[in-house]
Amino acid sequence: MAKPLLSLCMIVKNEEANLPHCLDSVKDVVDEIIIVDTGSTDRTKEIALSYGAKLYDFEWIDDFSAARNFSLEKATGEWILVLDADEKLEKRTAKKLRELAKVSDVDAYVMIQQNFRSSQIQPVLDFQTIRFFRNCSYYRFRGRYHEGVHHSIQEHNGKIALDRQELVILHDGYLQNTAQGELRRKRAIRHLKAILDDDPHDVWAHLKLGMELYHDGDKDEAYNHLIKLFQSGSTVDLKHLPPIDTHEALVHLAQLAIYRGDFTLAKRCGIASRPLTQIFEFCLYSEFAYIVGSLGEIEILYRDGKQVGEEEYFELASIMSKISDLRKNYYDKLETAHKNLLDYLHNKCLLLASKSSGGK
């Protein structure tokens, strides 16, 4: 009997509302559905079985990687796809995965997780994540919270494809259940703070806590932890940090630096990202290429904005997020859009400055 090509691996608990949508998006793509239940009391198990899933119970031990790895051990496919119940594959991605698995000369793919949120400033937030990889016994998740498989793949010299922007996972968990998302974040924050209580010099924990606090809205505390990336001096030690998370953290830190008017730090973040660009063969966050090259213009806008009010100050601070939203366009289009944003902000600052001085 031929070995299955693609196994879906999931861990779930009380996901009766989300699970059907997730499984509908992949049922015609995967050959095997592995679902590990960590203690559901609703219809989650019944729904899983109705889709032909292989269902396993796992006693929750407050460790996401342990549950993830248990699901991987049950998979028999050549490739593994990892999803959460509040996620689903974009239709074009579903069609593409089997093609890639059949002809691929790589070991893992970075996928784009599109997070839909209620925020009016940035309603869609993209993250890079490795969710599609070969079924190898030495490819395993690490980390009790914010688990990731990238460490083990890199340690075994696995080839990671990073330029597949069409591989998209849709995540609406933050939108459909904000309370649950906030609960998860609060739990992660408590856990990461406990790690730092034991080891205040754990840079990875500072990085993850800083990002959680950033998304939780506590920008000052986020800054205090993200700045620890530079605790060894003017550079960032990249040897023991996950590249994708580190790049994301540098983007957040640069945003916070601009908000504070610290353009020197913003430049340091851009410089620190260059080795990651070399590792990945292309820049995951292309906004750095434009922000670092245009800090002189932004600094002028910052000074103008401070003279005309809080709104412009905030608008300037969020410019990197706006550019990030345009990241999917071709580089020339992105550069044009970026220039238009700068022109718009500059003209608006001048207009408000004129009004505040009585039109003189």
Image: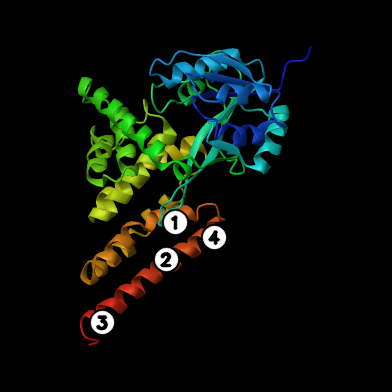
Q: Is residue 356 above or below residue 264?
A: below
Residues packed near mark 2 inside 10 Å, few (<14), some (14 to 19) or many (20 plus)? some
Q: Amino acid at mark 4?
A: Asp
Picture coordinates of residue 204, whole percent (x, y) = 32, 28
Q: CA distance from mark 4 to mark 2?
A: 14 Å
Q: Are marks 1 and 4 in contact (CB under 8 Å)?
A: no
Q: Is residue 156 above or below residue 182?
A: above
Q: Is residue 38 above or below residue 84?
A: above
Q: Which residue is mark 4?
A: 332
Q: Are marks 4 and 2 in contact (CB under 8 Å)?
A: no
Q: Quadrant of residue 31?
A: top right
Q: Is residue 16 above or below residue 307?
A: above
Query: Does residue 294 appear anywhere in the picture?
Result: yes
Q: Quadrant of residue 78?
A: top right
In this picture, residue 326 sits left or right of residue 216: right
In this picture, residue 90 sits left or right of residue 272: right
Q: Which residue is mark 3?
A: 355
| Identity of the residue drawn at 50% across and 20% down | 68
Q: Please, what secondary structure does the residue beneath circle 3 have?
A: helix
Quarter of the image that includes the N terminus: top right
N-term mark: 2 or 3: 2
Q: Quadrant of residue 250?
A: top left
Dot in front, 2 or 3: 3
Q: Which mark is residue 341?
A: 2
Dot in front, 1 or 4: 1
Picture coordinates of residue 360, whole percent (x, y) = 22, 88
Q: Which residue is mark 1?
A: 323
Q: CA distance from mark 1 to mark 2?
A: 9 Å
N-term mark: 1 or 3: 1
Q: How is the image coloured?
A: rainbow
